[in-house]
Image (cartoon, grey):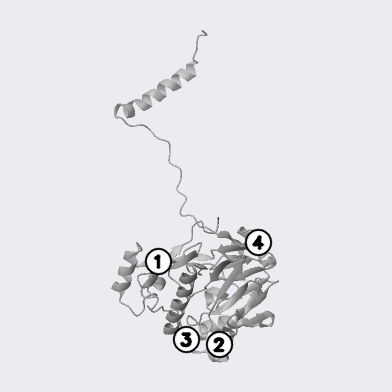
Amino acid sequence: MKSVSMSRRAALASAAGAAFAAPFIARGVTPVQAAAPQLGPSRPSFNRVQLGGFEVTTLLDAANPIPGPHPIFGQDQTAEAVAALAKENHLPTDKMVIGFTPVLVNTGKELVLFDTGLGGGAGSLPAQIKASGYTPEQVDVVVITHMHPDHIGGLMSNGHPTYANARYVTGQVEYDFWSSPDRLSGPTEGGAKLVQANVVPLAGKMTFIGNEGEVVAGIHGIDAHGHTPGHMAFHIESDGHRLLVWGDVANHFVVSIQRPDWHVRFDMDKEKAAATRKRIFDMAAADSLAVTGYHMPFPSLGYISAKDGGYRWDAASYQFSI
């Protein structure tokens, strides 16, 4: 066997290391390396699933912490009643996160975008579209479910159309309401001014539809009025697979769904909005229809189940993968 020799420098280093470790070993403590830095919560940007021959990509424009759910949700209820429902569903009682999730559908022939996010630096939709593998210039059709600012804010960028090569589709009732000069005063003033800036300049490239109106082959509109006067949902079908893009039919995955009659601050006609929720929920539950909601927790895909005379949001898992 060869003898093993150790240099004087190595011997000194070994002795120093042993001396450093000795007090820790004596106390039964092992010295550790410095911990890796904490990186903070992750922020997803997109999620893509297959729907028959279509690809559906949900895109997270923003996710903002705000006080709530009460009084935004359950506006006609006591704070205690809403807090009890939140607690029952393992949610904080005084704060929440609201997401903003446009949807991109590739039919194989057209690239169709539903809603355009917050825009103006508050959202990040063009960047998320790019992260998902597309560019804003590739969008063929932009569909507007309704004309609240968080859905039309991204139509324009620096005074120019963000989706320069697209045509546009929205509900006739919704456009007529918001584009009327009568809306430029009173409680609708702020929203109407944004419509004048972002929507009206695009009217020449818009198609205005009603119930059952077609966007492209396989996609048609459904009246879902109440949240706004002409709010619309959209039914998508490919090769027998179906998905409902419901926009703002329900905006909280617990309160709006488990208590559909409770008032929501942003519903312009609260009774009609509640009736629409129940009609859409009944349809989705009866047909086991997959849905995507603009403010549902990302990736904003799920199902509605009937429960105890009410309803429940069931987040999708692997249903689109098999």
| Tag nearer the camera, 1 or 3 | 1
Give the mark nearer the N terminus: 4 vs 2.
4
Amino acid type, mark 3: Pro
Q: From the viewer's side, name the closer residue of 308 and 253.
A: 308
* Residue on which the image places disc 3: 187
Query: According to the image, label 2 marks what residue?
Result: 177
Identity, as a three-letter code, of the amino acid under mark 2: Phe
Q: Nearest the camera: 93 or 300? A: 300
In which quadrant of the rendered image does the C terminus lie? bottom right
Task: Measure the C-alpha gap from mark 4 to mark 2.
Answer: 33 Å
Q: Position of residue 208 (x, y in %)?
A: 63, 83
Circle 4: residue type: Tyr
* Place of residue 132 in the rendered image (x, y in percent of width and height, measured from the top left): 61, 59
Instruction: Pick whichever of labels 4 and 3 is earlier in the sequence.
Output: 4
Could you tell me residue 18's position as x and y percent?
38, 23
Residue at image position (48%, 69%) is 295
Do labels 4 and 3 touch, CB within 8 Å? no
Residue drawn at 40 percent across, 35 percent down:
32
Looking at the image, is 319 positioned above or below residue 67? above
**Mark 3, secondary structure of its residue:** helix
Residue position marked by numbered label 4 in the rendering: 134
Query: Which kind of residue does numbered mark 1 sit on?
Result: Met
Q: Residue 97 is drawn in which quadrant?
A: bottom left
Cα distance between the residues tagged 1 and 3: 26 Å
State which mark lies toward you, 4 or 3.
Answer: 4
Which residue bears the numbered disc 1?
Answer: 96
- 198 to 130, vertically: above or below: below
Q: Can residue 111 be seen in this view?
A: yes
